[in-house]
Amino acid sequence: MAADDFKRGNRKDGQGSASWTRLAGIGFELVAAVGAFILVGYWWDRHFGTGPKGVLVGAVLGLIGGMYNLVRQSLLATRAAAGGSDTSDGDKR
């Protein structure tokens, strides 16, 4: 295996740079979802004086949404690695 193949993600075992960047992107999306909802909850608390309730609700909503996206993207990546479809509705292309 040449170094150029590794940089392009053309390794024979399928563990090229494209796969780890995709997984890292999924992780960053989870963190961004949680962080964004926490910030919205913090703004809600400051604006309406509701204490930590907005931050807690924001954290829960961010975790739910982020985990939903993480599971959905993981299933799509698994299907693509197995030669299946890249669509979210399960239709073969």
Image (cartoon, helix red, strand yellow):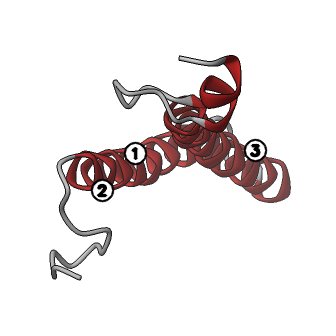
Quarter of the image where one finds residue 48: bottom right
Q: Which mark is residue 82?
A: none
Tag in front: 1 or 2: 2
Q: Where residue 21 sits in the image (x, y, percent)?
A: 61, 35
- Residue at 47 percent across and 27 percent down: it is 11
As drawn, 80 above or below 30: below
| Disc 2 packing (10 Å; few <14; some 14–19; many ≥20) | some
Query: Which of disc 3 and disc 2 is earlier in sequence?
Result: 3
Report whether residue 53 is seen: no
Left or right, residue 45 beside residue 5: right
Q: Callout 3: helix, strand or loop?
A: helix
Query: Which of disc 2 and disc 1 is earlier in sequence?
Result: 1
Left or right, residue 39 beside residue 78: right
Q: CA distance from mark 2 to mark 3?
A: 33 Å
Which residue type carries mark 1?
Answer: Leu
Q: CA distance from mark 3 to mark 1?
A: 24 Å
Q: Callout 1: helix, strand or loop?
A: helix
As drawn, 53 above or below 12: below
Query: Which of disc 1 and disc 3 is earlier in sequence?
Result: 3
- Residue at 74 percent across and 56 percent down: it is 44
Report whether residue 92 is seen: yes
Which residue type carries mark 3?
Answer: Tyr
> Which residue is outermost to the front?
2
Which residue type carries mark 2?
Answer: Leu
Which residue is disc 3 drawn over?
A: 42
Quadrant in the picture for the C terminus: bottom left
As drawn, 85 above or below 23: below
Which residue is disc 1 drawn over?
A: 70
